[in-house]
Amino acid sequence: MENTSRITTRRMQSVWKKNVSDNLQKKTRPTEAIIQAFLFFCGVVSVLTTIGIVFELGKEAWLFFGNPDISVIEFLTGTEWQPKIGNFGVLPLLSSTLITSLIAMVVALPIGIATAIFLSEYATPKTRTILKPILEILAGVPTVVYGYFALTFMTPLLRSLFGNNTVDVYNMASAGLVMGIMILPLISSMSEDALSAVPRSLREAAYALGATKLETAVQIVFPAALSGIIAAFIIGISRAVGETMIVAVAAGSGPNFTFNPFEAAETMTGYIARISGGDLSYNTPDYNSIFAIGLLLFLVTLGLNFLSRAVSGRFREVYE
Amino acid sequence: MRRILSVVLFVTVLSLVVAACSPTATATPTAEAAPTPAAQQPAPTEAVEPVGSDPFDVNPADFSGDIVMAGSSTVYPVSEKIVELFKADGYEGQGSLKLDSIGSGAGFERFCKTGEIDISNASRAIKDSEVEACAAINRTPIEFRVGTDALAIVVNPSNTFATHVTLEELAKLFSADAQQWSDVNPAWPAEDIHRYVPGTDSGTYDFFIEFVMAEVLGDTGEESFLGAANLQASEDDNVLVQGVEGDPFAIGFFGFAYYQENAERLSILSVEGITPDFDSAEAGTYPLARPLYIYSDATIMQEKPQVAAFIAYYLGNVSDIISEVGYFPASAEAIDAAKQAWLEAQP
């Protein structure tokens, strides 16, 4: 008896569900479809843009490498970059890109993570609501302003510390340091998100075992949020590698294969910005070279993004 | 959330890369010069005389329509000044007068290959290859001499050891053979030479290669120049000024106007014993004196009367204002020849 009634109820439920879902489907209003189509269109636009970019970069870079005087191996291993006289070695540009990015990360990573730990573990909600927006203002400063900040503040500072003969007027250290300041809010904000996402129960367990606040933050919460922090770090590097205005203004405008951060050296982005300023003939190897460099830059950032995904997947810790 | 954030950032990075690649994304200084204060307004063309008596006494108020010009950063300040006056004198097409500072070579590129501009500014004479390119799009460049520049060789004010150079020393200073100042002249200190030079597509670069590097070192001059260590190249002459100003062992060169503008912050060298000034540039005794030009085409001048009028206005006024900008007037004969060329281009 009971069984029968249960079955009947189930049947009734399923009939009712079916009706409801039929009704819902039938009642789709035309505006709904338009909105859906619009949202889909927006998604497709960004995908198509990406494909277009890759296609255009590849096409122009193909023109560059199609030139019989230029070999990919020479491009990747040469230490002289002077397209006008046929020297196409990208290493001087690559090395200065890496050096400025490295300096930027040395500044941004420790300060950024420390800020994130403070904001998520120590700061009272009130402090946080004041501090966080202020920090985010740094992210809103236009990069050209950072560029002149580097040139007119950081460079003179470095020169007064280390001497005018050691530090060039245009140098990688100044650009790198200021770039670090620029990336700082990115690192701290992403790391703070990662730290805050660690469940409260972990902290409480640590306190229950007698851990201090610092021990909890550094030994429990930080490792638990490591995947997010590594992702922040790698995205910070991508940002630094792609940064243009700061290095174009402050790091110098001549390719220079050096590892001395106090010397002037042009980065990949700086070179692209200078050459595309309209001062070169179209369809010359020099002009096409900027697309080859652009492609290389794109591959570097793309690689870093893949790495970021892989690493954050590897270190991901899931808590319920 | 993190994943969304990272995707957003990825797209941002992408767009940054693209922005850096796109030629239009980089700002070129454009002379959207605001109308000048009344004090700077000149009187000569206030249409006192009846129009038509002198074709070079143009009343800009009679003309409208766009005028597009681009080219040498050296000629830029002169053209900028003329544009300013042209507008102040009542040119109707306010704002449709475009002037870009992109280098002589790029100016000819836009004039002869893409045909985007009406007037090309140049700090060197047009090359045969550029004339051919122009012919391919049915343009015949007409040359108008507008003034004279004396290429300024500058060093840091704290540099007291080098006050004059010979052409040979100058070529050596900018060659790959010399690493330190003492490599050029044993009396100079054993410090690295820091070179601040115009970019490879500027007329100033071409001029220096042709009249200094190739003159002394022959065909290898350009290679040696570009292969030199501590070389900073920029189309923006202010970048060079800043570099030399802040660097005790720097040397650089650019148009005289940029020296004039920053004379207290830089020291200028004499070349072969001759200091660049009005007399030595005019007489041609300063070895690095060079002519400044603007170029246009008869068909453009006939189709766009405002372009012809602008050039006439340019030729009529340039000698009065050019020393204000920091260059030297062309000789009266050169200006007369330019005016003659203008008259011949009329229908």
Image (cartoon, coloured by chain):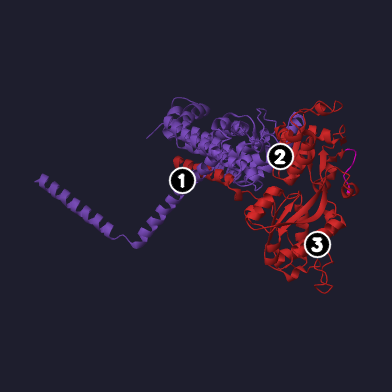
Chain colours: A purple, B red
Q: Is A61 placed above or below A262 here?
A: below
Label number found at residue B233: 2
Q: Earlier in the sequence, mark 2 or mark 3?
A: 2
Q: Position of residue A252 (x, y in %)?
A: 69, 37
Instruction: Indicate which label's residue lies in the foreground, 1 or 3.
Output: 3
**Residue at (63, 36) in percent of width and height:** A267
Instruction: Indicate which label's residue lies in the foreground, 2 or 3.
Output: 3
* Mark 1 and mark 3: Cα distance apart in space: 56 Å
* Mark 1 and mark 2: Cα distance apart in space: 34 Å
The answer to which quarter of the image holds residue B310 is bottom right
Residue B70 can be seen, yes or no? yes
* Residue numbers of the magenta segment: B272-277
Q: Chain of mark 1?
A: A
**How crowded is the residue under tag 2: few (<14 C-alpha within 10 Å), some, or many (20+)?**
many
Q: Chain of mark 3?
A: B
Asked if labels 2 and 1 touch by Cβ distance under 8 angstroms, the answer is no
The answer to which quarter of the image holds residue A184 is top right
Label number found at residue B340: 3
- Are labels 1 and 2 assigned to the same chain? no
Q: Which residue in the protein does label 1 denote?
A: A51
Q: Provide the secondary structure element on which disc 1 rests.
A: helix
Q: Is residue B125 left or right of residue B167?
A: left
**Residue at (81, 66) in percent of width and height:** B56
Residue type pointed to by label 1: Ile
Image quadrant containing the C terminus of chain A? top left
Q: Provide the secondary structure element on which disc 3 rests.
A: helix
